Amino acid sequence: MFMSKEIQAIRDRDPAARSTMEIVLVSSGLHALAAHRIEHWLWTHNLKLLARIISQGTRFFTGIEIHPGATIGRGVGIDHGMGVVFGETAIVGDGCWFYQGVTLGGTGKQTGKRHPTLERDVTVGVGASVLGAITVGEGARIGAGSVVLTDVPPHSTAVGIPARAVAWRDPASGETRRVEQLPDPTSDTMLSLVQRIEELELQIRALQARQEDRVP
């Protein structure tokens, strides 16, 4: 069945998907991926202008922009998908999963391979940007809102701006091991306030001592 792996991926990972018929009729991510199959075939058969014209129509109807030159594997899913952008030289492995607002983009006006390569079963969170000719390893997870500028190791979780790996997951057991604590802005702010209060108290005591020394 056409797009059967993509349909099954949506059924497995999207709790809002109640039936295959519903997925086929209303899943914008599935529609964009199906259209990309046609666009990519045209692109690789030197019908590049026609491929770009069709991809612009797909973008208009789905809100998802996938360049016809991008290479996308099987069983890929795009949940909701509004604002998702895949660049021309992006490579997406089988089983990857994307949420809305994800960008697989470049970092400038380079030529050649300038977009990311995602290996199998990568998950990219809402609003994340993966930029440049980098590689995201198999089974890695990218946190929402992260900006990834360097390679991400397999089976790791990367978060932040710029993103860094903070945990690794054992693919056999599924057990996650945290290797770096996430920053806590609230705790950092409180610590800074306490340190400032202590500094002010020392200054007040020094002023009081000077005042007492001046009193006859």
Image: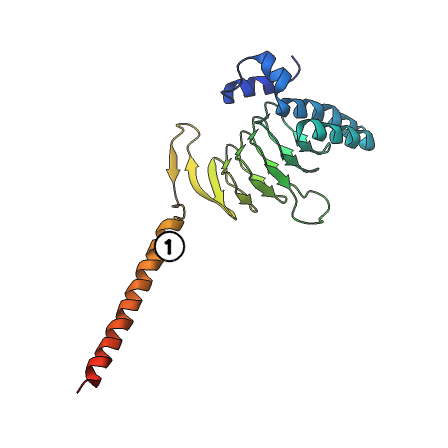
Residue 50 in the image: state x and y as whole percent: 82, 29
Q: Which residue is mark 1?
A: 189
Residues 60 and 76: in front is 60
Give the farthest residue toward the bottom: 216
| Secondary structure type for disc 1 | helix
| Residue at x 34%, y 54% (from the top left corner) | 190
Q: Position of residue 140 (x, y in %)?
A: 50, 35
Decide: is 48 above or below 209.
above
- Is residue 46 visible in the rendered image? The answer is no
Position of 180 with respect to 77 (left or right) is: left
Q: Which coloring applies here? A: rainbow
Q: Residue at x 23, y 80 (%)?
A: 211
The quadrant of the picture occupied by the N terminus is: top right
Q: Can you name the residue that lies furthest to the front here?
A: 216
Q: Which amino acid does the dot numbered 1 rest on? A: Thr
Quadrant placement of the C terminus = bottom left
Q: Quick check: 20 above or below 14?
A: above
Position of 154 with respect to 80 (left or right) is left
- Quick one: which residue is furthest to the left in this view? 216
* Total tally of numbered discs in the picture: 1
Task: State which quadrant residue 86 falls in.
Answer: top right
Residue 179: x %, y % from top left: 39, 43
Residue visible at 68% across and 22% down in the picture: 34
The crowding category of the residue bearing disc 1, from other C-alpha atoms within 10 Å (few below 14, some 14 to 19, many at least 20), is: few
Q: Is residue 30 visible?
A: yes
Q: Is residue 26 left or right of residue 143?
A: right
Residue 68 found in image quarter: top right
Q: Nearer the viewer, residue 143 or 210?
A: 210
Residue at x-position 59% and y-position 22%:
75
Q: Is residue 11 above or below residue 137?
A: above
